[in-house]
Image (cartoon, rainbow, N blue to C red):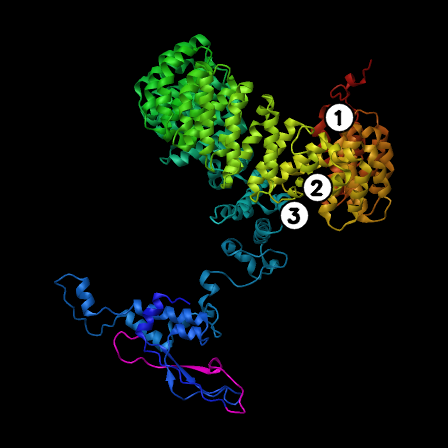
Amino acid sequence: MKRSRDDDHHRNQEEEVKEPPKQKIKPNNAPYRSQWDLKPTMIKEEAKGEKGKIDNKTINIKDEPINESQENKEPIEKTNKISLHDQLMAGIITPKEYVTLKNEQEYKWRNRAFTTEMLNELLPVGFEIATPPEGYEQKRQMELKQKQETGSLTNVGVNEKGDYYTIPEDAVNPEDFNVPLGDTEEGLPSIKPDDMKFFAPLLEEVNEEELTKEERNERHVMKLLLKIKCGEPIARRKSMRTITLRATQFGAKAIFTQVLPILLSTTLEEYERHNMLKVIDRVLIKLADQLKPFVHKILYVTAPLLINEDYFVRTEAKEIISNVAKAVGLVTMIRVMRLELETPEEYVRNITARIFAVVTSTLGIPAVEQFIQVVCKSKQSWEARHTGTKIVQQIARLMGLAVLPHLKSLVNMVADNLKDKEHRVRIMAAQTIADLANAVQPYGIEAFDPVLRSLWEGAHHHRGRGLAAFLKAIGFIIPLMSPEHAHHYTMNIMNTVVKQFSSNDDHVKRTVLKVVSQCVSTDGIEGHFVRSVILDDFLKFFWQPRMAHDRRNYREVVNTTIAIAEKAGVVPIVEPICEFMKHDNEVMRKMAIESISRILSKLGATALSERLQEQLVDGCRFAFDSAVDLHFAVLLKGFGQILKSFGKMAKPHLPETLGSIKYNLSNNRALSRQMAAELIGEIAPVLSECNEISALQHMGQILYEHLNEEYPEVLSSIVKGLYAITKVLGMSQMQPPIRDLLPRMAPIMMNRHEKVQLYSVKLIGLIADKGSEHVISQEWMRICFKLLELLKAFKKSIRQAAMRTFGYIARCIGPQEVISALLDHLKVQERQLRVCTTVAIAVVGETCGPFTVIPSLMTEYRIPEMNVQNGVLKALAYLFEYIADDCKDYIYAVVPLIQDAMMERDHVHRHLGSNIIQQLALGCYGQNREDALIHLLNFVWPNLFEIDIHVIQSVMNALDALRVALGPTILLLYTYQGLFHAAQKVRSRYWKVYNNIIQSSQDAAVPSYPRILSEHPERNDYNRYELDMFI
């Protein structure tokens, strides 16, 4: 065994090892023992006083055999000192002890004191040793002394057994963190430490009878909020309903004083914030009269969410502010937000503008128009004018084309601000004009006539971002003009725009690109103008790596390039861009390929010369060989799109491309193999169009040989390539033969990678649909049972592909064998498998015809087993949903079965029966099956008073479907009898049905209203004479 330098280093500092004594002659009556049987004992000895020596443990070896009588005796014979390494090799110490002792020795060696000679070598001449003051003691020496008194360095933090680290019991005291000790009441969730400041009173034992009414309400609301924030879903929904229905009883103060601080918490999770916002949204309308004192606090909490990155959070905030505006009115909103209009903080003014935009979209522009005009023309401060202009901008962005009827007044509000003394107001006014023009495009050019001169003058007097704002406004107005005016304005403004191409400000560059794209896309601009004025400078200043690396700049450059190509032609823009396909920068290559592929797919490649085609394909191959993991998807899609645009002209370039693909398929890098397989899937239609059947067969054979790929990403691309080749070749010409390919795909289909599963199922479904005769029926049955597992896949596309494949297989081998196997799966205990089985049965019925499945299902329903009957009902619900209008042929056959299910005591039977009735009613709409539907309605109606939430939901859906099929009149006749019932719970259910009818079929329900007799016909006549007329 080799020894390290550290061992030799420490060995030199220890005493020489003495030779072990010779083994004594074994007594006649003692068993033979080797030297390894000697008993070692460790004794600490202090090191000799020699300088540089390190304390070590010595070993006493008593050279006598160990027996039971001497096993516990301490040896007192002579000792031998040996190194730590020898102790480890002799088994005297464990490896863990060896590492600990060695680290301790190294720690002492590295932290030894400097000698005078060492200090003289380290420090320059002139330093003297200072005399320490009296009573001074080095801190390090004190620590070492304490450690020597308490034990070694390795004993700190070790428990009594010495095997792991333990925190001292007195190290953590809950009271130090202000966490009260105690448990919540029964039925309440546990309180997090971060929530103690909100829900700590719930830990105190309080006699609620001694509390006042307000205190009881606050405590009740606190319990409900705790359940909503931290409770289980069932408790959360129940608490949400309670706080909504009893909001007026609790009062606004009890609710908002507790909800709003929770929303301001910095440790709030996203789902918790969503629940708290939902609480506010639901109680706003209920508390409309009590809401005014809390409007400012609600806006203070919800307004910052208007600029949140998450779209759904912004939508929730808009809904809450909209409901607040509806509840309290415009006057209260203006009074609350008045001071924020003139605040010097731009962040606050920005949020205020967004709030007023939401209020305007809620209450209408005419209601707020006069107020906004006053703010925009304020003479007190430029901040107010800036905020008013910002409000108009946010209205345009929020309402879009809805501002068109009020466009002229909105433009007049901000027209004077284009010449304001404050440059920030002028910039905001120009940006507002641009947003208004963008919102109403392509209408409303007449409304912008008052501001055209101001915009034109501003574009010639401003610089930097101010110029960019005015150019943007002009650029968005030009597309609204007639072709003659658009040509005139573009010719005059384009020189100013081109000068800004060399700007170093990215914001200005993006604005200029947008202006160029808008101006070039108008009808009045001709191609020679674009080629002579714009094209050269555009390529010089925007096709740079700096622009490509910024995501927003990248998108604008690509869109502007396509717009220029539509006017200037394909060749003038593709030929110079082609050079960037071999650029050293990966992002530049990506931008070039994406631009060229989109141009060719939109405009075609007929104008390209052979030389340019060769350059494009060569550049694509270079980018393909040099691709990295970040951008290969865009490169492959662009490569395939370029070849597709060539059509049959791509045939001369295919051999080199296929050679590159075959080379990369054998590459050691997994990414290269994946890209090669993906590219085969992209160009397979091109090979078919060029009649390269042999090449397709050859590539299919190569991909078949790579099906043993170990990386799932690469395997998914290989299967995708095989799917594309099989789709274009057909079953008869496919190589390898289908009879060899399908058995290999069956185990691959069970791979856990989602993409592998998706394309494997798609390939198997394609074979089952087009070439089922190439495979024996036993193989299809084996695949059927494996497909059942994929029906419960997480990804929806996989489940849909598996369902379609199941139907194809059942059609090719006959439904009876598949149905008999599937019905057996209804008896298993695993619920998810039963649900997947019902879906598979419905798919088989849809593909092979309902008459092949319904008799077997009705026979199976006679088995008195709960799981089987529920599975049959669920399968029928799915089946009638899939076959839609064909339900009319089978409704009379299944009515007795549904009737039996709706009379069962088990609520699951009635829940599933209502689902079947819903699908039957929608499928039989207008099919003259009203007699059967009315019969089923009589079985649905008594379940209107069901308590289970799932049952009542399915019952309401069934009644809504029956309203569609039978018309609202019949359901109104059922509803009238309970609208004024004495019991409140009965009335609520009837009114819920009535409200649904009125909301959905209000016009059709008018003839069904009851006649009302007038006591004084001369004053009030309620008769509807037009309904009494008929032809």
In the rendered structure, which amino acid carries the disc numbered 3? Answer: Lys
Q: Is residue 42 above or below residue 732?
A: below
Q: Residue furthest bottom?
A: 28
Disc number for residue 238: 3
The answer to which quarter of the image holds residue 556 is top left
Q: Is residue 950 above or below residue 1016?
A: below
- Identify the residue shown where x is 18% and y is 64%: 121
SS at mark 2 in the image: helix
In the rendered structure, which amino acid carries the disc numbered 1? Answer: Ala
Q: Is residue 844 left or right of residue 572?
A: right
- Identify the residue shown where x is 64% and y is 45%: 241
Queried whether the magenta region covers residue 318, the answer comes back as: no
The answer to which quarter of the image holds residue 794 is top right
In the rendered structure, which amino acid carries the disc numbered 2? Answer: Leu
- Mark 3 and mark 2 lie on one chain; the one further toward the N terminus is 3
- Mark 3 and mark 1 lie on one chain; the one further toward the N terminus is 3
Q: Please name the residue that numbered disc 1 is placed on.
A: 1005
Q: Is residue 564 above or below residue 905?
A: above
- Mark 1 and mark 2 lie on one chain; the one further toward the N terminus is 2
Near mark 2 (Cα within 10 A), the count class, few <14, some 14-19 or many ≥20, is many
Distance between mark 1 and mark 2 Cα atoms: 48 Å
| Chain part drawn in magenta | 27-53
SS at mark 1 in the image: helix
Q: Is residue 507 left or right of residue 297?
A: left
